[in-house]
Image (spheres, rainbow, N blue to C red):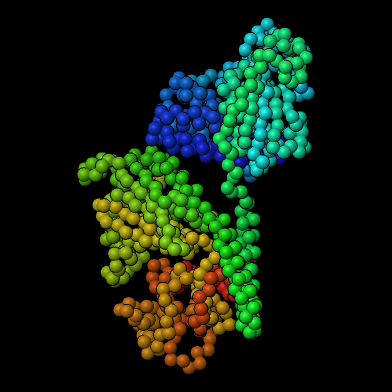
Amino acid sequence: MDTSKYKGLFVEEASKNLQEMGESLDRLAGSPHEKEAIDALFRHAHSIKGMAASMGYDDISALSHKTEDLMEKVRNGKKEFTKNVFGLLFEVVDTLQTLVDMVASDSMDFPDCSSLIEKILAEGKIEAGTLSASLPVPPPVSRTGGFHEESAQEGQPGGSSDRGWKLFKIHVLVSSDAPSPAARAFLLIVELENLGTVKRTHPPREEIESGRSGMENDFWLFLVSQAEREAVENIVQSSVELENFTIEEVLITRSQEKTKETREEFTREKDKKKTTVPLPAYRKPASVKVDTPDLDNLVDIIGEMMVQERRLFDLLKETGSTELKNCHAELQRSIKRLHNQIMKLRMMPLAALIDMLPRAIRELQRGTGKEVDLKILGKNVRLDRAILEELGDPLLHLVRNSVDHGIESPEERKKIGKAPCGKLELTAWKEKDLAYIQIEDDGRGIDAKKVVEKAVEKGIISREKAESLSGQEALMLICAPGLSTADKVTDISGRGVGMDVVKTAIENMGGNIFIHSVPGRGTKFILKLPMTLAVAKTFLVRQGELLLAIPLSKLQFVAEVPLSSIKEENGKQFFIRRDERINIMELGSLLNLPPGSTNGRAYEPVVCVEIAGRKLGLVVDHLLTGMEAVIKPLGLPLSRLGFYSGVIVTGKGEMGLVLDLERFSGEMER
């Protein structure tokens, strides 16, 4: 049987089961005897085992099988749910997820799981080869209906030990909105075969397995098993996206084996029991799954529509037709609404990213011996998918820094009058079109003086510069490359790398990072992020014949600075604005562009931007206007130019390059 057509469904269902296993483990971390969570672990391991066996993924099936055996002992009270079991199950979930990811990427060179299986066997004192199911071997499969005559023998229905065998006729109604009903029917058949033998299906099993059935949303089957009806109901009911199902149960005897009624559909049996299991009222899914490339294509298309709409607006300026202008205004509103809806489709809750933090905290506690109470607020704040993809590593690094550098050991905390368990709080909120994420701990805080001394010692700043730094500027020095205040190097941090990468990653997303700290009381990291990267607000300038766009998130102010206000000191030009010195540089010289024409003007157009936490005035030829634009990435060879991060198109069809201002940080030191 070719199971490749079901690979996508297997990956989807297995990943969902593994995610729910992780959530159950999170619940057990706080309540290790919660029966519902323990039962869920057993059920999910069982489901993965059955699906993997049906697909021929023996390594996944074997590992989940032994995990199921272990959880069977735990839920039956034969095994304590200890810390060792807890840690072992996390290792199992990680390993299974790795294997499932390899299936998704068509890489079948699975790592050896034998050592992990041996640890499970040792923990549960399970003998190798022992099966969790204690059911007798069911009768041979007959896919054409009815029982084999040779099955009437010892230990099988109709034989001398036929007591307890049952025949279940199961009718299942799949939701009409559920994708791939044949694939879901196939997976249910595989699950039920863990309890016995599926004897007949409609549509025929061969057609379901091959995908030729053309079934709509209902099917039925016969199951021969010694299991209780409750076990059958549990498996059927756990199937996803069902509207309803019915179960008819018949006790099989030797005489019934030989009757025509038993061979057909057992519809005239007098001792037949029928159970209809009502399900909760079915709710049609409020969402559909859309592939990421399709969403990206939609963003590209709406971007092109916005460009054409602006072009139409410019053309309409040349006509006096009120009707055309009104039509354009309505079109503009419709495009704006469509654009907003597409942007919403790209948004994902922050929970998709931060749900992994409790697990990371537990690993850090084991590695450091510290006690940490993690509190998360605002996990439903939604951000662009592209931002979430880039935010994972910086966020995890900040959390690791808080635990390793910030929060003290239990012994140290007791000595200074703090509770042994440190507090770490992650809070997210949004303001207008910006999102904020705050990571706060109640640890030892950051000694700004120590940071400055380290920076001077390493030659990052001069002694004179150090003396003029504000408190915030001193704290931001921890983001300088190669600077670490850790007294010793650990596996977690202290190598002088990380915070500079965090800052660069946040700024590449158009965001900023702020640090507040009080020695002895704790530290706050605040991330300021745009809600989306697909559309950016920019300010347009012109340098020579080149149109340039500056991200509005980096813009401090624009000004026409009189030439008489521009001073020079040590070869650097600057002007004073509100008692603040603003250094200025020619944008054209930074980009190696020929000087533009000033036409004898008595002022310099200046765009003040923030780069690496410092302000810099860029002298341009012309200040233009603000513009909300869809930014397209630069392809080769333009991406090698440097100083540019993307391209935009104006309403007149003119292309403009988006400046990557972080590339200028090195020039500021000259």
Figure check: 397 above or below 550: above
The quadrant of the rendering that contains the C terminus is bottom left
Residue 286 screen position, x and y as percent = 57, 47
Viewer-nearest residue: 568 or 657 = 657
Residue 356 screen position, x and y as percent = 46, 44
Location of residue 253 by image quarter:
top right
Q: In percent of the image, x 66 and y 10: which residue is there?
A: 162
Residue 437 screen position, x and y as percent = 41, 56
Residue 378 screen position, x and y as percent = 42, 51
Figure check: 383 above or below 669: above
Horizontal side, residue 521 vs residue 655: left or right: left
Q: In percent of the image, x 53 and y 70: which residue is there?
A: 628
Outermost residue to the top: 160
Q: How many marks?
A: 0
The quadrant of the rendering that contains the N terminus is top right
Q: Is residue 276 visible?
A: yes
Viewer-nearest residue: 290 or 293 = 290
Viewer-nearest residue: 506 or 354 = 354
Q: In percent of the image, x 44 and y 50: which residue is there?
A: 379
Figure check: 13 above or below 312: above
Viewer-nearest residue: 73 or 483 = 73
Q: In percent of the image, x 46 and y 54: which residue is there?
A: 381
Q: Is residue 669 visible?
A: no
Figure check: 509 above or below 89: below
Horizontal side, residue 324 vs residue 204: left or right: left
Location of residue 142 by image quarter:
top right
